[in-house]
Amino acid sequence: MAAINVKIDDELKENGDTVLRSHDLNATQYITLCWMYLKQHGRPPFITDTRIFTAADLTVIIAGQFAEARDQALKIRDMLQSDATPYLDFAAEKLALTRRISDIQHNGWRLESMADDGGSVGAARLMLPRINYYLAGCEFTLSGVTAQLPAPVQVVNDFQISLVAFEKQLALMQSVLRDAGLLPRPEPAREFVYRGENVTVSVVQPEDYQHGAWLVRMQTKSLERENALEDAALTFPVLEGRVFLPGTVYGKSVHDSRSRQYQLGFTFHSGVSEFHMYTNGHEEQANPTSPDMLASCLSDSVDGYLLGLMKSMSGNQP
């Protein structure tokens, strides 16, 4: 102990002894405890496991901030169309949205100084400026709101256009982050998976969905198929007892050659398509079209589209 005391800086030892006395310890007792810790854990007690904060971590944080801003914007959208909402309540929500956007921009500046992680996380990072652009568009349209509600129709329409574009880009980024394992997927109560030639189809019923409601997700099996299906317009198969409802992101207007009318179909973005499906006219357990059959039919629809595309391309060759 005498040798240790000689080698320690006087000021450092004095400050350390003060801390030890506050814990009713002397130097000998503390050193004994340190050696006991070394024996039990194989490392010094003052070394802790650390994890480097990466661009991927900050990207996930910003994605969460965008999701919160989306909820705020949806609340504002409902207020814009209501004459029962006091203007002061609307102004408070608008201010809250502005503050959220400011926080997002602050983290965006931090992200610019961090090294790119590459891969799918890098792809998600590249989506951030576009998402922020559409969110800022939502905020900008609110400048046209006067001191009373409901807002002018033009303002409501412009806000809705920016909001839909914002939701679409945000959903795409969230999908990329889920595929990279950085965002959790909702735990399904039931799930059916069909692996077709060109796509894998998952028919999932999350725990918070009603009995006859399902979430359908299709993912391409190669980059070649992803490129061929990007922004393509596909019709839903006509299946007894089933009805499809695509969201704003993956829904697409499709011309039906048989009826010569346009109908709402689906499309792919970055190799993924996702939409809702419901039972119709039957109890779920007695539905003539099982989830397995449905997944197979959707896969066949994609196969048919790609086959037609290949024939069309080969027919144009000299």
Image (spheres, rainbow, N blue to C red):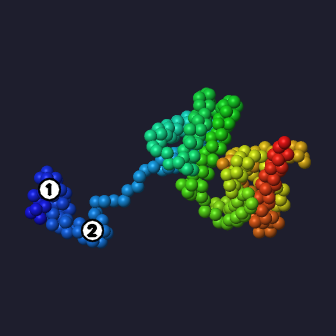
Residue 225 in the figure: left or right of residue 173 = right
Residue depicted at 66% across the width and 48% down the height? 270
Q: Secondary structure at mark 2?
A: helix
* Cα distance between the residues tagged 2 and 1: 21 Å
* Label placed on residue 136: none
In this view, the residue in front, 252 or 205, is: 252
Residue depicted at 56% across the width and 38% down the height? 129
Residue depicted at 60% across the width and 51% down the height? 176
What residue would you read off at disc 2?
38
Q: Position of residue 304 (x, y in %)?
A: 81, 54
Residue depicted at 66% across the width and 41% down the height? 164
Residue 250 seen in the current view? no
In this view, the residue in front, 122 or 159, is: 122
Q: Quadrant of residue 242?
A: bottom right
Relative to 249, residue 276 above or below? below
Q: Amino acid at mark 1?
A: Ile
Residue 231 in the figure: left or right of residue 32 = right
Image quadrant occupied by the N terminus: bottom left
Determine crowd level at label 2: few under 14, some 14-19, many 20+ residues with C-alpha closer than 10 A. few
Q: How many marks?
A: 2
* Label placed on residue 8: 1
Q: Position of residue 183 (x, y in %)?
A: 55, 55
Image quadrant occupied by the C terminus: top right
Residue 5 in the figure: left or right of residue 247 = left
Relative to 23, residue 15 above or below? above
Residue 23 in the figure: left or right of residue 265 = left
Residue 131 seen in the current view? yes
